[in-house]
Image: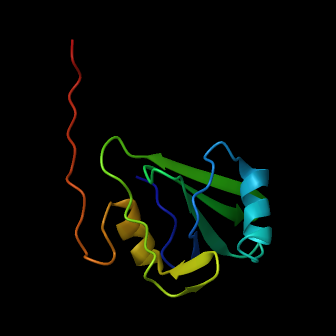
Amino acid sequence: MIRPGTDLKVYLCREPVDMCKQIDGLALLVQEAMVLNPFDQALFVFGNRQRDKVKLLFWERNGFVVWYKRLERERFKWPTHLKGEGETVTLTGQELNWLLDGVDLKAMKPHKTLNFQRVG
């Protein structure tokens, strides 16, 4: 799987976000709710209310990139205990990868691995 580098700054939005939002809507949230610059060399992470979907937004030289993940079972363990100001939590690149892998950053316990097989 393609993942962003762990050397980027990572900012996680604490509040749930409508996953219908596209690049412009997410960039506006970065500016207004998170009070950050969406053009910074940083990764901005958003989750939905059910915590089964996540979108990442980042600026790459000449355009925005959106990365999207939907879980089939389980939920992302949204870190509310980590340091942050207002609407934003700061993560390391490694913590982001753990979050995307389903690890509860507070308990350091991952999701179960799912193995689906094609039927028919």
Left or right of 27? Residue 88 is left
Quarter placement of the C terminus? top left
Q: Nearer the viewer, residue 59 or 107?
A: 107
Instruction: Tell me residue 106's x, y (percent).
Output: 31, 78
**Residue pictured at 78% horizontal, 75% vertical:** 37
Instruction: Tell me residue 44's x, y (percent).
Output: 62, 67
Q: How is the image coloured?
A: rainbow
Q: Nearer the viewer, residue 97 or 36?
A: 36
Left or right of 86? Residue 114 is left
Instruction: Tell me residue 59's x, y (percent).
Output: 72, 64
Left or right of 118? Residue 92 is right
Q: Residue furthest top?
A: 120
Residue 7 in sight in this render? yes
**Residue pictured at 45% horizontal, 54% vertical:** 51
**Residue pictured at 57% horizontal, 58% vertical:** 16
Instruction: Tell me residue 89's x, y (percent).
Output: 55, 79
Q: How many marks?
A: 0
Q: Nearer the viewer, residue 102 or 65?
A: 102
Left or right of 30? Residue 97 is left
Dividing the picture into quadrants, the one containing residue 117 is top left
Residue 18 vs 94, above or below: the answer is above
Residue 18 vs 81, above or below: the answer is above
Residue 38 in sight in this render? no
Residue 19 vs 109, above or below: the answer is above
